[in-house]
Amino acid sequence: MRRSSALVVTAAIVAAASVVMFAAMGRAVAGLVAALVGSYLIALRPIRIEQLRRAVPAYLTAVAAQAVHMIEEYRAGFYREFPPVWGAAPWSSESFLVFNLAWLLVFGLAAVGLKRGWWLAVVVALFLALGGGVLNGIGHAALAVRAGGYFPGLYTAPLVFCAGLYLASRLLRRSRVALAAIQRS
């Protein structure tokens, strides 16, 4: 698929995913939707396929960290505690589980896409790194401060934060060759 076609198709998928997230989970996922759209915009910068392939181990580490984090959130009742922070009704445990399993499926499929250089997979990887990792880790710390103690997901928040930061650095790193060419111009 040509890059211009991939941009349009990916934009449509990001828009559809945003609508589905809002419809299924309500306004409490506004931060995730913003992270997904932001990931699309960041992914507009060119990334070489070799760089994507080198990022796969960091990506798989971030997916594993996210899975562990989702387990803590589920067992600790994040689905009951988080939506009221946004003035919304608590989610059911079933809807929270389906939402998270759907994202784990998307993350798994994107691993294949990264190896093949699919642009949609780049957006998903950036979303995992920035939304599911860095912002999620910061958000859990802020929620714990707000709660005056533990908030579901806090214990594994540093794990997703670090994995997300590392993945973002692998995806967004410019090669030394590219940096040298920029500095010479």
Image (cartoon, rainbow, N blue to C red):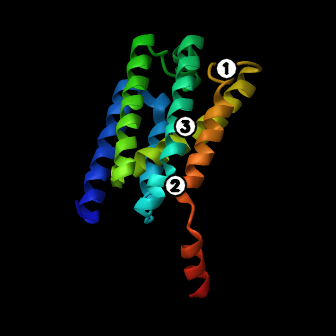
Q: Earlier in the sequence, mark 3 or mark 2?
A: 3
Above or below 184: residue 9: above
Q: Residue 174 placed where, x, y %?
A: 56, 66
> Which element is circle 2 on?
helix
Q: Which residue is mark 1?
A: 151
Residue at 67 percent across and 24 percent down: it is 154
User: Splitting the image into 4 quarters, where does residue 98 fall?
Assistant: top left
| Residue 42 visible at all | no
From the viewer's perspective, tell me whether residue 50 is left or right of residue 130. left
> Which element is circle 3 on?
helix
Q: Residue 70 placed where, x, y %?
A: 53, 23
Q: Earlier in the sequence, mark 1 or mark 3?
A: 3
Q: Residue 101 placed where, x, y %?
A: 40, 23
Residue type of the residue flagged with mark 3:
Thr
Instruction: Work out how far the residue at label 3 is from the one at label 2, CA to CA, in angstroms.
Output: 14 Å
> Which element is circle 1 on?
loop
Outermost residue toward the bottom in this view:
185
Residue type of the residue flagged with mark 1:
Phe
Q: Quadrant of the N terminus?
A: bottom left
- Are the two marked residues, 1 and 2, in contact with CB atoms closer than 8 angstroms? no
User: Splitting the image into 4 quarters, where does residue 86 fall?
Assistant: top right
Residue type of the residue flagged with mark 2:
Leu
| Residue 98 visible at all | yes
Q: Which residue is mark 2?
A: 171
Instruction: Work out how far the residue at label 1 is from the one at label 3, CA to CA, in angstroms.
Output: 24 Å
Instruction: Work out how far the residue at label 1 is from the one at label 2, CA to CA, in angstroms.
Output: 30 Å
Residue at 63 percent across and 19 percent down: it is 152
Q: Which residue is mark 3?
A: 61
Q: Residues within 10 Å of mark 2 (few under 14, many from 20)?
A: many
Residue at 49 percent across and 38 percent down: it is 60
Q: Quadrant of the C terminus?
A: bottom right
Q: Earlier in the sequence, mark 1 or mark 2?
A: 1
